[in-house]
Amino acid sequence: MTTETTAATRPPRADRFDPASYEAKWRERWEADELDKARDDDPRPRQYVLTMYPYPSGDLHIGHWYAATGPDIVARLRRMRGNNVMFPMGFDSFGLPAENAAIDRGVDPATWTASNIERMRAQFRTMGCMFDWSREVVTSDPEYYACTQWLFEQFFKAGLAYRAMAPVDWCPKDQVVLAREQVEGADRHCWRCGTPVIKRDLEQWFFRITNYADELLNFAGIDWPEPIRLMQTNWIGRSEGAEIDFPVETDGIDPIRVFTTRPDTIFGATFMVLAPEHPLVVALTTDAQREQVDSYVVAARSATEIERLNAERDKTGAFTGSYAVNPLNNERIPIWIADYVLPGYGTGAIMAVPAHDERDFAFARKYDLPIRYVVLPAPGELPSGQAFAAHEADEVLADSGEFSGMPASEAIGAITQQLSDIGLGAAAVSYRLHDWVVGRQRYWGAPIPIVYCAEHGAQLVPEAQLPVLLPPNADFAPTGVSPLQSDAEFLAAECPVCGGPARRETDTMDTFVDSSWYFLRYTSPQSVLAWDPDKAKLWLPVDLYTGGAEHAVLHLMYARFFVKALRDMKMLDFDEPFLTLRNQGQILGADHQRMSKSRGNVANPDELVARYGSDAVRCFLMFIGPWDQGGPWNPSGIDGVYRFLARVWSVAQPSGTDAARPATGSEIEELERALRRATHVTISGVSDDIEGFRFNTALAKLMELTNAIIRERNTGLAGSSAYAEAVDTLLLLLAPLAPHISEELWARRGKPYSIHQQAWPAYDPALAAADTIELPVQVNGKLRDRLVVTPDTPPEEIERMALESEKVRAHLGGQPPKRVIQIPGKLVNIVT
RNA sequence: GCCGGAGUGGCGGAAUGGCAGACGCAGCCGACUUAAAAUCGGUAGCCGCAAGGCGUGGGGGUUCGAGUCCCUCCUCCGGCACCA
C-alpha cells in the first residue's frame, strides 16, 4: 500500500478521461516489451488459449472483435493467475474469395491476400488483445503449405488418403466442382451464380475419416458444449442393424446385400429397392424392362440435387423384371430401382417393408405393391392405411413364422442370429458420415503433392521436392477449369520411380486441411518440421478453444480426426486437440440479418474505436449479453460503458482530488468495512464470471463496485486504505476486460508496470461476509415485510420477530399460522 | 419432418426452486449553465389517488413457494433433412 506516499510525491492530476491519449501508447509499450510473448522456457504452468483464426477477407468487423475479446479476457485472467499463457493468432489465407478477386478484378491472389492480411493485422492490433504475433501462422505461405503437403503424404502412406471415383457437387453454369459448403440453402444452389447444382462422378482425393467414426463419437474427457457434441453425433449418424443377403433368381448374380436397422421386420419385406447407381442394376434388368430402367437411370443422374433429395416429392422408380428370394420364408419378391434409395448409404440397396416404413409405404401405394403388417402394437390389433413404425418394446411380431408373438426388441437379435446361422446375414453398423473429399479444382490452395506416371500411376512427390509451389502469373480467365490445368510448366513432372515424364496433380487441398493442424504449428512456427515434437509436448493439447458454432461438423470434426490419425502415426501423444471448447454467439446486423457487405449492414469497429477507444468497444461488446448468445448489433448502449470507464477514471485518480468530508472514527470504520466487503464480494464474483464466460455479469459487478466506491468517496472516505484497496482491486479486476485504462491508471497510481503481470486479487471470504442480512417475510408466498437480522440470529427469534410484524399481522387476520417455513439466510414464509 | 437453443419492462439483459426486473440504454424530474451539451442527484414493470391488485409466450400441474421443475400448445433462431 504505497499509494498515499506515491500520490504525495506527485502533483495531483485530474486529466480529462481521453482514451486516445494513452491506448496506442500502451500497446506500443507492450509490444516493445514483448509482454505477450509466450516463452517455451517459462517455468510457470502453461496454458494454451486459442481462438479460431480468420479468413483474411479484407476488414475486421465487429464480429471479429466479439469473438476475440472473450478468449482474450480469459487468457489475461489466467496469466494474472500465474500461468504462462500462449494466445496466438494467424490467418486462414487460402480459399475461394482470393481467386474470385483474381477473376473479377485481375488481382493476383497472393497479392490480394497479402495486402488484406497486412490491413487486418493492423486492425487486430487496435483490439489490445494479448496475441503473441511472434507465432503468427499464414496458411498460404510456402513454408506452411509445404508442411500441409508433407502431412498429406503421411496420410497417403498411412492409407488414410486415397483416390476414388465419387459423386461431387457440380455447378452446370460455372462448369466447376463445388465444395459441400459452397452449396447453399434448402434449394441446393451454387453460392456464386445461384444455379441448382447436380451430382457428377469424378475421380477425387479422399481422407479416410470414416476409420475414426466410432472414436469421434466419444467425447469423454473433453469439455465441449452439448449442442456441438450432438451435431457431430448426428452428423456421424451411427445406426445399428444387420446386413442381410437376398439371393436372386437370375443366374450368375451374387445375392443383393441390404442394410436394415429393423431385421425383425424381414417377414414384411414385399419388394426390394436398389439405388439407380447400384452396380447390379444392369445385370438384373430384363430385356423387357430395359428401356424403362435405362431411362429412369438417366433421369435420376441428371436430376438436380434439389429434385433428388426433396423428400416431399412423389416416390418414383422402375421395376427391373427380376426377383429376389426372402432368405427366411423363401418368398419371391420383385426388385425395383428408385432414387429414394441413396447409393452412398448402407449398401445402396434395401429390403422394402412398406408396413413399417413411411417411404416404402408411399412407394408401395404408388406402384400397388403388397403391404404386410408384421409388427403389431398389441396382439391382434391391426393398423391399416398407414406405415406403422414400431419401436416400443412391448410390440410383438405377427405373421413371421416361428418368430410370431415374439417381442420386437427380442426379435431383432433372434432373427439376426438365424440369418447368421444360414450364412445370409450378420449384425452390422452403418454411418452417415462419408470420407472427406479433400481435392478442390481450384488454384488458391495447397497443391496435392502427387504426380501421375503412365507406368507407375499416382506417386507422391519426394519430400525433398516439397513444397510443390503454386506457379505465379497464372491465367485466371474464367475458362471453367483450374488455372493449374492450363499451365504446361506446372503440369510437367518427373516420375519418382522411373524418372520418366509424369503429369502433376492439379487439384489443390480443401482449406479445411490447412485449418486441421494450424494449432500444432503455433507451438513452433519457425520449425523446418511441421512442428517441433518437443515444443508440441510443452503446449499441447489446446486448453481452451473458442470460435463459432458454424464449424461444428466441419473444422471441429476434421481437427479431431487429424489429431487421432497423427496419434496413430506416432506423431502426437494425445487424443483430442481441444480440451475445452466454447462457442461465441453471432453478432447480427441491426436488421437482425447476418452481417454482409452486400446487405450493407456491417458495423465498422474502427469508427467506434476512434470515438470511444478500444476498451469501451471491448467492454460494450462483452456487456450486451451472454457471450454465447450474440444478437443484433445496436451501438446505442456504448455510451453507458464509456461513462462507466469515465467513472473508473475519476475514482482512480490519485487521492486528494475530492473534498473529503471529515468523518468520525466509528463512522469511518463502518464505511470502510462496507467498502472492503463490496471489494471482496466483487473479487469472487468477477473471477467466477470470467472463467464461466459471463463477461456481461462480470462487468455489471465491476460497475456496482465502482458505484459503491463513488458513494463512499462522496461520504468522505477517499484517502483511506480501504478506499485505496478498493480502487486498486477494481483496476486489477478490470485489467482483463479493459487492458488500456487499467494500465494507465495503475501507472498513474504509482504502481509497478505492468498491471497485466500482477497477481490476481485474492478473495477473502471473511471480509466478504455480511454483518447483517435482510430477510423477506412472506405470508402465503407474498412479500409483506422485511427483517434485518445478524446472520447468527436463532430461528425461533426470527419467527417471533416475523409474527410480531405489523404488516404480517395485518395479513394474518388474527388467525394463528398453520406453518412457518424458514430458509436460513433466505426468507421466512408464513402459511395460514 | 427430426435434433438442438430461446421466448422476462419501451430496449439489451439479471436472477443455486426463495424479495422478478441486478447492471446498463432510452425516458422523465431536479442541480449546475444565459442556454445547450457534458456531468452530478433523483425517478422509473403495468393498473390504481391510495389501500391494493396484476405481472417472466398461452393453458394445465407439482410445491409452503415456480421465470426456474413436469405435461401440453404457440412463436422465433440454428443445424440436419428420403440415411433404410
Image: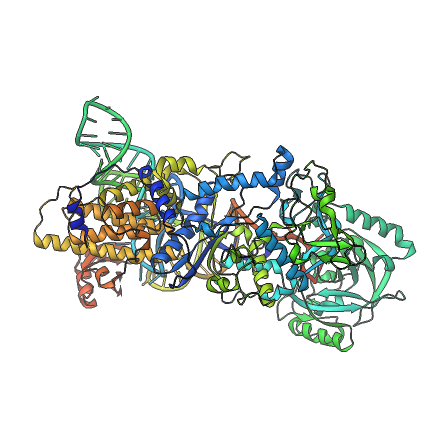
Going 68% across and 74% down the picture, which residue do you hit?
Answer: A413
Asked where in the image residue A161 lies, by quadrant, the reply is: bottom right
Where A724 sits versus A413, above or below?
above
Q: From the viewer's perspective, is A184 left or right of A70?
A: right
User: Residue A790: x, y in percent?
Assistant: 18, 62
Going 31% across and 50% down the picture, which residue do you hit?
Answer: A734
Q: Give the image's coloring scheme.
A: rainbow
User: Residue A205: x, y in percent?
Assistant: 70, 55
Q: Is residue A738 visible in the rendered structure shown here?
A: no
User: Residue A464: x, y in percent?
Assistant: 65, 57
Asked where in the image residue A826 lies, by quadrant, the reply is: bottom left
Which residue ends up furthest to the right in the rendered image? A287
Decide which of A205, A170 is in the foreground and name it: A205
Quadrant including the C terminus of chain A: bottom left
Quadrant including the N terminus of chain A: bottom left
Going 45% across and 36% down the picture, which residue do you hit?
Answer: A604
Q: From the viewer's perspective, is A350 left or right of A334?
A: left
Decide which of A764, A14 is in the foreground and name it: A14
Q: From the viewer's perspective, is A119 left or right of A620?
A: right
Q: Is residue A25 visible in the rendered structure shown here?
A: yes
Going 29% across and 47% down the picture, which residue do you hit?
Answer: A703
Tally of numbered tags = 0
